[in-house]
Amino acid sequence: MSFKKIIVEKEDGVAKITLNIPEVLNALDGETINELKTAIKDVGRDKGVRAVVITGAGRGFCSGVNLAPSASVVEGLSEIHEIIKGITTMEKPVIALINGPAVGGGLDLAMACDIRIASEKAKLSEIFVRRGLLPDMGGTYFLPRLVGLGKAKELIFTGEIIDAKEAERIGLVNKVVPHEELNSTGMELARKLAKGPALAIGKAKIAINRGMELNLDSALKDVIEAGVFIFGTEDALEGIMAFVEKREPKFKGK
């Protein structure tokens, strides 16, 4: 599968998707949105892929959305929302490697991922209000869940641009690393997750995401079916046998 504006690489159970329009800080135009949507569907279906990394080429992660003036707002947003939903419903861990500016829709894309690792050079902002707009790619949903209601309102209402350290302090990113170590750190984590029990990790991701919308009783009931399924997998048996035999488990994603 060939793309013009993104790069997809698969190795060691990890799919790395790189937005590749560095001259515009990887702003998402119509063609890029279509390619990214296709790539997300592909890696989600590919049983050989057990972890996903999303990053940007050059000095930026993603500077938002750059749709043609003639494009339908509803149609354009619907396409973008398919990407966001594809990431959040994929039963695989998705890591955002934020190598530079992640603003507007770019920040929303990063927040849709399960884990965010930022370069010390990263800048983050829900910049929409500075254009007279509101976050429309999931920012109003994700940001309060990551940083709390009050801080989310502050960042959305002001469009403030924050640096990587502040993003880490408030919980917007999981970790900040030196710029030159970003790729190696992220890929090391992705390979570690890919070697883990893929089915258990995938089901845990969905349970966590669903659990944010449920009360405790409903959340506990929700994981019963997933738990029964996981107990019947080869990976669960391997995990138990490895513990009994005092060795490292070798998971196969089955």
Image (cartoon, rainbow, N blue to C red):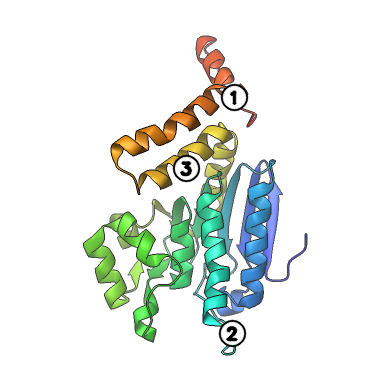
Q: Secondary structure at mark 1?
A: loop
Q: Which amino acid lies under the numbered mark 1 shown in the image of this protein?
A: Thr
Q: What's the residue at 52%, 66% (across, down)?
A: 81
Give yes or no for contact between labels 1 and 3 (Cβ–Cβ under 8 Å): no
Residue 139 lies, in percent from the top left, at: 39, 66
Q: Secondary structure at mark 2?
A: loop
Which part of the image, by quadrant, shows the N terminus? bottom right
Q: Which amino acid lies under the numbered mark 3 shown in the image of this protein?
A: Lys
Q: Secondary structure at mark 3?
A: helix
**Label 1, label 3: how many angstroms apart (C-alpha)?**
17 Å
Residue lying at the far right of the rendered structure: 1
Above or below, 125 against 84 in this view is: below
Residue placed under numbered mark 3 in the picture: 205
Circle 1 Cα neighbour tier, 10 Å, few/some/many (<14 / 14–19 / ≥20): some
- Picture quadrant where residue 138 is located: bottom left
Residue placed under numbered mark 2 in the picture: 71
